[in-house]
Image (cartoon, rainbow, N blue to C red):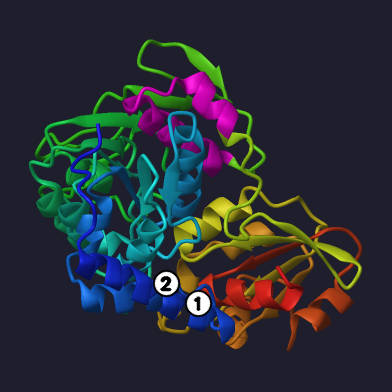
Amino acid sequence: MAGNTEPLSPRAKLAVTAGKAAAAVSRAAGRGSGSVIGGRVALKLDPDLLGRLAQHLDVILVSATNGKTTTTRLIAEALGAAGPVVSNALGANMPAGITSALAGGSDAKFGVIEVDEKYLAGVARDTTPKAIALLNLSRDQLDRAAETRMMAEHWREGLSGSKAVIIANADDPLVVWAASSSPNVVWVAAGQAWKDDAWSCPSCGGVMQRPGEDWFCGQCGFRRPAPSWALNGDYVLDPHGSAWPIHLQLPGRANKANATSSAAVAAVFGVPPQVALERMYQVQAVAGRYDVVSFQNRELRLLLAKNPAGWLETFSLIDPPPTPVILSVNARGADGTDTSWLWDVDYTQLAGHPIFVLGDRKLDLAVRLEVAGLDFRVCESLDEAVQYAPPGRIEVIANYTAFQDLRRRVGN
């Protein structure tokens, strides 16, 4: 299955060693995992290193706006039944971070790699993947990322004629449009809760018709393909019509959808659905997401939500009122500096919850909640919010850098 296994050249070995040294220095200085700086140093010394490190692996790429870190973790767990796996499990999903991850996988059989949407085509070109999972596309970081239809077009062009098996969400028209340029697609009915980025046809621009779970364009005929795999309640339906129970420690329907796509990927490599799904149960948290931590003698559940689609999914899995909710929003480089997306989120779903607002852009969020007619308290710190929160476990929802800030504060 895996490709060329010739040993690394002296130049590549030097690049790997230098990258690991740079990463170690970064960690020692308290600047994070060091994966990005390590990868940058390594790629500077050998620009073709990513492809060299991938040549002995069966590579699986995972890309989406939401859910790619969790799905990558679930696929890695499932494929562990068939051999050693190397993965960028902490979510460093651009070429430098991916290179660092693969540098530690010399003995691995599989490389399960999360890829930022903008880099998917390039990473696919460098790593010659055996499979690519495409989960969803929605608006995210609009000040620096392409508009969703442009991103779908970029995927479509980059994956055209790909020899990889494409495992794609049949319920997202943008994903279907992107994947349709590939000759070998496995369609998965994983669902699509957020539909506001997919009302116009990506093929012709016409208005999409959406009767029930189906969708089609009345102008050009572009329509939902028949899925081979499907999420049906708490079960995965495989191509033979067999139903396999999903038992996850991760909450929410979105993670059942992620598990369904992961089972379809695992099957490409000969791992049966029952085995894949049983192994996925071992995953309790993903890079801090869903962790329940103790802080100031209180239990906090940490939830990441980076964009409107992610917030919608997160609201569906929090405990009901009167559970207290802390919301934290930043707008740093890694988040995107434009906070206009806050107005696309239906915060009225938080009615009845005691709400506490934090983060660099807490006042932007406060204005949005005020317009939504919600009661809330603006706080200067997590400590203050926890102090005023009524009894019970606290749900903490934050966007990317705010989530990292909170993890550092609680020592997670």
Residue 24 appears at what percent x and percent y? 50, 77
Proximity of marks 1 and 2: CB atoms separated by less than 8 Å: yes
Q: Amino acid at mark 1?
A: Ala
Magenta segment boundaries in residue numbering = 253-279
Q: Above or below — where is 174 with respect to 244?
A: below
Q: Quadrant of the C terminus?
A: bottom right
* Residue visible at 52% across and 72% down in the picture: 33
Residue 126, located in which quarter of the rendered image?
A: bottom left
Q: Which label belongs to residue 238?
A: none
Q: Above or below — where is 129 with respect to 259?
A: below
Q: Is residue 241 visible?
A: yes
Q: Main secondary structure of the magenta part?
A: helix
Residue 21, located in which quarter of the rendered image?
A: bottom left
Q: Which residue is the extreme one toward the front?
A: 10
What crowding class fits label 2: few (fewer than 14 Cα within 10 Å), some (14-19), or many (20 or more)? many
Please tell me whether mark 2 sits on a helix, a strand or a loop. helix
* Residue visible at 42% across and 65% down in the picture: 92
Q: Above or below — where is 51 with respect to 17?
A: above
Q: Which residue is mark 1?
A: 24
Residue 307 appears at what percent x and percent y? 46, 65
Q: CA distance from mark 1 to mark 2?
A: 6 Å
Q: Amino acid at mark 2?
A: Lys
Please tell me whether mark 1 sits on a helix, a strand or a loop. helix
Q: Which residue is mark 2?
A: 20
